[in-house]
Amino acid sequence: MAERRKYEVGYGKPPEATRFQKGRSGNPAGKPKGARSVKADLEDELKEEVEITEGGRTVKLRKQRLLLKSLVTRAIKGDVRAAARILDTIDRMRGPGDADDQKDLLLPEDEEVIATFLRQRDSEDHDGG
């Protein structure tokens, strides 16, 4: 007669002989220990410092800072794609509550123009226009 099982085999209850063995990976060809991600490598690379000559002086700057300086310089010289990239990055860095902080970026003249526009729009709404 067949050997009697200690429990019923079924969904979520595999036979003991086919279960994962303790101390043995279920994915032996998986990621090796100590393998680094591209993100980790990029972060380390951008943290490295290099020496550059700026304004006749030699200074040490991180590569991340140099990358940003280069992007800003290109934007200032009229590179529309570089400017768009900077503005896009700024928008992504802002959190949901930072929208109110943008009010501080307006000059008093800008606030006056906006207030005038809103008054005109409101008066047109009330006049039926």
Image: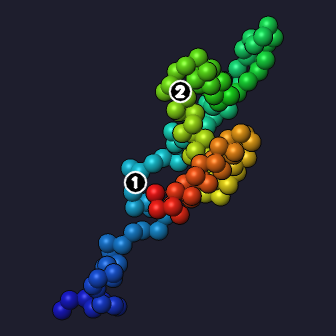
Residue at image point 56% right, 59% down? 122
Quarter holding residue 42? top right
Residue at image point 42% right, 68% down? 21
- Residue 98: tell me if it is visible: no
In this picture, residue 13 sits left or right of residue 102: left
- Residue 83: tell me if it is visible: yes
Q: Residue furthest front?
A: 127
* Secondary structure beneath label 2: helix
> How many neighbours does mark 1 have within 10 angstroms: few (below 14), some (14-19), or many (20 or more)?
few
* Secondary structure beneath label 1: loop
Which residue carries the number 2 mark? Answer: 82
Residue 28's disc is 1
73 vs 113, nearest the viewer = 113
In this picture, residue 75 sits left or right of residue 110: left
12 vs 62, nearest the viewer = 62
Residue at image point 41% right, 51% down? 30
69 vs 35, nearest the viewer = 69
Q: Nearer the viewer, mark 2 or mark 1?
A: 2
x, y percentage for residue 13? Answer: 33, 82
Badge 1 amino acid? Pro
117 vs 57, nearest the viewer = 117
> How many neighbours does mark 2 have within 10 angstroms: few (below 14), some (14-19), or many (20 or more)?
some
Badge 2 amino acid? Ala
Residue 2 vs 56, above or below: the answer is below
x, y percentage for residue 56? Answer: 79, 7
**Number of callouts:** 2
